Structure formats: structure tokens, C-alpha cells
Amino acid sequence: MSKFIYAFEEGQQSMKDLLGGKGANLSEMMRLGLPVPNGFTITTEACIEYLEKGGLSDEVKSELQEQLEALYAKTAKKFSDDSLLLVSVRSGAKISMPGMMDTILNLGLNDKNVEKLANNTNDARFAYDCYRRLLQMFGQVVYEIPMHAFESYFNDFKKQKNYTTDADIPAEDLKTICERFKDIYTEEVYKPFPQEPLDQLNEAIEAVFKSWNNDRARIYRELNEIPHDIGTAVNVQEMVFGNSGEKSGTGVAFTRNPSTGENKLYGEYLLNAQGEDVVAGIRTPKEIETLNTQMPAVYQAFVDVTHKLEEHYHDMQDIEFTIEDEKLFILQTRNGKRTAKAAMKIAVDMVEEGVLSKEEAISKVESKSIDQLLHPAFDAKALEEAEVISHIGLPASPGAATGKVVFSAADAKAQAEAGEKVILVRPETSPEDIEGMIASEAIVTTHGGMTSHAAVVARGMGKCCVTGCSDLDIDTKNKTVKFPTGELAEGDIISVDGSTGHIYHGEVQTTNAEHSTEFEQFMTWTDEVARLKVRMNAETEQDIAAGYEFGAVGIGLVRTEHMFFGEERLIQMRRFIIASNHDERVAALDELKKYQAEDFEKIFRLSGERPTIVRLLDPPLHEFVPREREEVEAVAGQLGLSVEKLGRRILELQEVNPMLGHRGCRLAITYPELYEMQVEAMMTSVQKLKEEGINCQPEIMIPLVSTIKEFTNLKEIIVKKINELNITVDYKIGTMIETPRACLIAGDLAEECDFFSFGTNDLTQLTYGFSRDDAGKFINDYMNDDILAIDPFQTLDVDGIGRLIKIAVEQAKSVKPDIKIGVCGELGGDPKSINYFNTLTIDYVSCSPYRVPGARLAAAQSK
């Protein structure tokens, strides 16, 4: 029989799957002797059972009653008793989802109990402040009453009474507010606020379980690749009160700076406040060091706790705490979300401090996060000339972004989908804004600090964010932003610097990112640990230079078709296409050969002695011909043809399924002179460089092979051409495995090939029968309906495509153990796919230049 509820003292850190991250860490902290309020955790298994059955089972209800009785005994308090137990109800999944799930505080209050709390504390203002918070949270979380139904009245009330802060509201006015909040229940959901604490608790637990499947939680899980089937735990914990006066407070702190990685306590707190006030961004909090002045003993106790937790978990911690009458309580700890820059510094520092090994440090950095380090920042000179809109914001998440101002998540999403770059500007963000935050280039808020919702979520996304811009007046209704020297309207362009907190009018020029010494050191460690090597897919000088700067060991794919679209080159390519005989085709190709030779010389010069795979022409010829009538007329004039003749040739090239048609090696079977030209241009360039003392490693790739004869016929043509040129350089000839048939005959192909590289884009397309250009129209429906767990064009389908690749690799290595095998499709840069490739005897993956560092880290993290 399963156990569905565990008291905190019954659990431990290793039970994260069952107790969720929050519950497991609460249990672990209690085992460490830290000041954790008593409570219990309802397991993720109970959540999954609830979602399947649609209700709490009798077993869960029975265990709940037993745990409540035990909690009464531990706390010497009880629901509705004079001693008065109040609890918080918080979600906590195995994988942290900051701000995505639901929380209810002060549960157990009702019309009678609020008076008991007032009498027990001799503070009616405090008691009714707790009650109005419960009414708001319970109404929103359990009954789904829109928060604005409460907030609009609450804010109007404060304005009418000229109250600046929530703490200014006296007890009698809070009573009035509570009465109005109870009326909202009957107006919005036609039933009263439940007065029985046990009813409140049961409804709250069910609401938290239901919140696992709310829209914002599902979107967050999809964004962060968190499984949908693991469920959330529920933590029920004795309340401690940070809103019980000026000797109480609440805060959030990181043991190191989550933006820079500096080894210094970093956080914020509010006096006379309760849990959600800090992260909600409603009041601007104070820096954690200020607590040392206001409550030095509490501050020192907290510092001691932070050292103990970081030492225990071997990682930077994100800690939530409450102070009640100068007594410290720890409500949560978890591995802190951090920027990639901070993650690098923290990992390297902890190795140097002797806290972590290199292998452990590598495991602490998310491979996807490295992308944050590789993008441009604002140019220093351009910033000197830029008009500053705000300079007092907090640098909540680094980066540099430019876009049009929008005021709502819905507008951000709509305009981004229309191709616009937008900046979401709001007083503060909430979990409901998640889709708009994803769609935006950056987020700007007037309220909130470094641990507000906007800050935490943006850092997790690697999204530029500035919070606390109190010199801005954001009017979301009229869609304006007033700043000290002017006003912005929706659609105006601003630039946001998440590294400084500054905001500028208009577009500001950017410069390439610079790597820190920590980055270089960390990436060196990844190469020491990783088995898989990482090459790049690149053919332009800029991309190749970037890829080698990012640590690529060679080029895994040069796509030669990209070399034919310059104006003069395209004319000659079109002459080749419309040629009516062999001599005309060769004449056009001779002109193209000059351009190809120049290109190859630049590419191989940049590569030097590193291996470089050149894929011979792959796309169908129709991609090079004009489509629109005006363009057809212009091209006909360039080529000296009649429009009719060119039109007929274009019609001849049309195919019903061009990606399954006359392309890849099939082109060269029909027109062998095409590959002969490319090989001659390539090898003469390599020979020239050899004479300069540069010994290049050319690897010639024949694409889209499905039969042995396709490969051997073309290989014979290529070798013959190279022999005719009297080339004395070493070279290899291989193929791209991108058809299911090629996978199944890989052993036979290996006898003829010097290397393989899997083209996962076409292999996925041809195995599924999905057009990769059109699958986007329905692939999300497949994932939403659980027909597919992942988009197979983004992450490897291990059961299908992965199995084909495994068959091919095993066959090839059994025939030729030293054959080099790589992956050069988009999946070569995907961390989850890389983890699978590392289980095979594949030698390298290849990806776009800016994905190289992430791929290197993913290779080091693979097991």
C-alpha cells in the first residue's frame, strides 16, 4: 500500500521524485537542524492519482487527517482552537518551476478565527491583513476569480483613503476590505468563501493539483523541456508571519550573485510583509545587507544558514525566509537559477575553492544556457550618443535587445508572430504573462527587484530584463510610457541593456560578446571530459571564424548550394540549367568553377589542417530558377532567351515532390560534369594551399545516397577527375546517410566509404513521411494530444530515427572499425540528441557555429 503523505522529518533530499524539490529540501533542512516550520508533504503520486481519478482518494483523506493530528501535537496549535493553527499550502514539483505554480497563505482563517488571531497577537490590523490576503489568494487559486476583481477595489480603496502602502491601512479599513472581498465571491462564483478550515484545506490541495495542468505551467514545462507526467507535490506548513510588525519580514536571497556569479550574499527583503510581496514586485524591497543594520543577530543567523546550505548542496542556493518577531525561519532552498555568465563563474570558483571536481562543475551548467554568452552587447560608443530613457532600473537578466514597445502579453505574442521584435513593458509581470515574455526580446517593469517574477523567469529563459524602473510611468490602458524627459507610445522603439539596467530611446548598435576567462577555462574542461568531438556547419568566412573561436575541431558540413546565389554566380548556374547540350553545360560550369575555387580556398585556408567536409550540390535545380513573371522576363534578358523558352524550361523542372525528386547524387548521375566541376575547384584550391605549406584535410561528401551503385559510380568519376589533375593531397570520399535505405545497407556502404555523416533533417523527414517545411502546421497538435512527445526535427526520435542510426553505426563499424562517423543535421546541436549519440560509436557531431559551445558542454555531460 502506497504512503501518500510524509511529515517533513520523514523525508530527505533523495526523495525528490516523490516529495518534489521543495518538499525534499524542507525535509533535508529539518534533518540539518535548520529553523524550518513544521509541516508535511502530499506526494507527486497523490497528484498523479488525483489527476487520473478526478478527486482525492479515501486513502489520501485518511492520511491527511492523521498528519493534521500529528501537526496539532507538534505545534500545540489546532484549526479553530484558541491556540489557532494557520498553514500555507504550496506546490513543489521535482523540477523547479519558479512562479508557475500556485500558493495559498494564512489558510484556516475565517470570520471567527480572524478575531482569535487579533486577540492572540493583540494586533487587529495584522490579523485582518492576513485575512484579506487569504481571501485574495484562495479566490484566485481555488475559485479562479480574476485577481483584478480584488486588486481594482483594493487599489481604488487605497487611493480614496490616501494610503501610500498596504501597511498604512488600519484594522477597521482592512475589515471593510475583507467584507467586500467576501462579496466578490458571491458575485463572481455564486458561492461564499468557505468558513470551515478543513474544507479550505481540501479545496486548496485539489486546486494545487489542478494547477499542474494550467496553461502557464504547461507552457513553462514545454519551454524548459520538463515532462508533463511527473506531477507536483503539495506542502502544508505551519504559518510564520513576516507581516506582524516592523520586527518581522520576508525575503529571498541567493548565496552568490545570480547575474554575475560573484561570491557574495545577494538578496532582498521587506519588513512587515508576507511571502508573495517580495517576488510579486508590488513593493520595492531592500538589499539583504541592510538587514545587518536593522536586525544584526538575525542577519548573522541567516548568513550562517546560507554557508551551511551551500556547503551541503555543493551549489549556489536560492533561499526564501521569514522573520517573525526577530526569529528566523527558512521556508525553502533550491539550486538557484542563474545566468550563463554566473553559472560559469560559480562553477570555476567552486572548483578552485575545492568544493567541486571538474566533472561536477560541468554538470552544474545547462548546455542551452551558454547561448546567452554568445550574443551581441551594445556598442560602447553608440551608448554614449544614445538617449537615456531610464538609468535607475535593476539589471535583472543580462543581454542587449531592441524592439517595439508593447503593453500586454497578448500583444507581444501577436506582434512577434507577425515578425516584429517587441519589448514587453509593464508595471510588473505575473505568471499569466509567460507567453508574452517568451515572445519578447526583453522585459521591462517599473516595480519589483532582482527576485521578482519578471527577473526570475527572464533569467531562466536567458531573456534580457530590467526591473524596478520607478522613474517610468507605465499606463497599460492608454498604452503610454512617461519618462523624465518625454513619452513613448506603443510601437516606439527602445533598446534595453539587461547588464546595466539602462533603457535607451531608439535602436542602439551592438558588438559581439566577449568571453570571460572563466568561460575559456570551463570550456577547456569540457573538452577534457567529452568523448564526442564537435564540428560546425558553415561556409561563410564570418561563420567559420566564429565556429573556430567557439572551439569547433573542424567543419562537418559545407553546403555548396549556398555558394551559387550571388548575382554573377546565379546567372551562370541558370545558364547551366537551361543548356541544351553537354558543351553548353560545361561552358557555364567553367565560369562557376572560378567562383567555387575562390570560395574553397577561403574555406580551407580558415580551416588549415582541420578536417573539412564539403557536401557536393544537393538541392533540386528548380530552386535556382525565377518564379515571378517579372523576374522570369529579367532573367530571360540576361540569358539572351525568349521568355517562352525560359518558361518551358522552368515548367520542365517542376516536380510534385521536389525533396523526393531530382536532387543530391541523382543530379550528378544525370549531370556528372556538375560534381566534376566542384571537385576540380576544391582540389586545385587544396593543392595550392599545400604548396604554401598548409596541409588541408578535404573530405568530399556525396549526398542523398540510397544504393551502393549511386555511390560507387560517382566515387569513380570523382577519383578519375582528381587523378587527371595530378593532385598529391590526401582526401576522403564519403556520404551523408539521410535515407532509411542507406541506414539499412550501411555495412555495404562502409566498404566503399571513408566516412559517414547522418543528415538528420532529411532522415527524419523521409522516415516519418513528414515534410519538414510543412510539419509545423500540425506538429504542435501532435504534441498537445500526446501523439508525439517531442518535435522530431528538434530532438532525436530515439525509438525510430535513433534505432535506424544505431543499426547503421553498428553495421558500418563492424565492417570498418576505423570509419569516421558524424552527425551534421540540426540535431547535432541538441543536448538531448547528443546524449543519445554519445551512447553509440559516433565520433563527432556538427552544428551551427553559435551552437558549438553548447554542444561541447552537452558532449561533456553525456553519459
Image: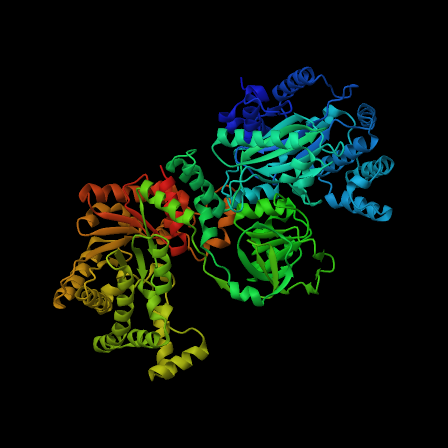
Locate the C terminus and report the quarter of the image it occupies: top left
Q: Residue drawn at (22%, 59%), measured in percent from left and top?
A: 696
Residue 509 lies left or right of residue 180; in this view the side is left
The image quadrant that residue 192 belongs to is top right
Foreground: 192 or 497? 497
569 to 186, vertically: above or below? below
Residue 769 lies left or right of residue 820; in this view the side is right
Residue 75 lies left or right of residue 812; in this view the side is right
The image quadrant that residue 729 belongs to is bottom left
Q: Residue drawn at (62%, 25%), measured in percent from left and top?
A: 36
Foreground: 566 or 622? 566
- The answer to whether residue 170 of the structure is visible from this angle is yes
Q: Residue drawn at (68%, 16%), measured in percent from left and top?
A: 69
425 to 488, vertically: above or below? above
| x and y percentages locating residue 395 in the rendered image | 58, 51
659 to 86, vertically: above or below? below
Callout count = 0
| x and y percentages locating residue 72 in the rendered image | 69, 17
37 to 104, vertically: above or below? above
Q: Residue drawn at (65%, 36%), measured in percent from left and top?
A: 292
Foreground: 313 or 836? 313
| x and y percentages locating residue 274 in the rendered image | 71, 35
Foreground: 569 or 497? 497
Which scheme is used to colour this image of the protein? rainbow
Residue 633 lies left or right of residue 195; in this view the side is left
| x and y percentages locating residue 595 in the rendered image | 28, 73
- The answer to whether residue 802 of the structure is visible from this angle is no
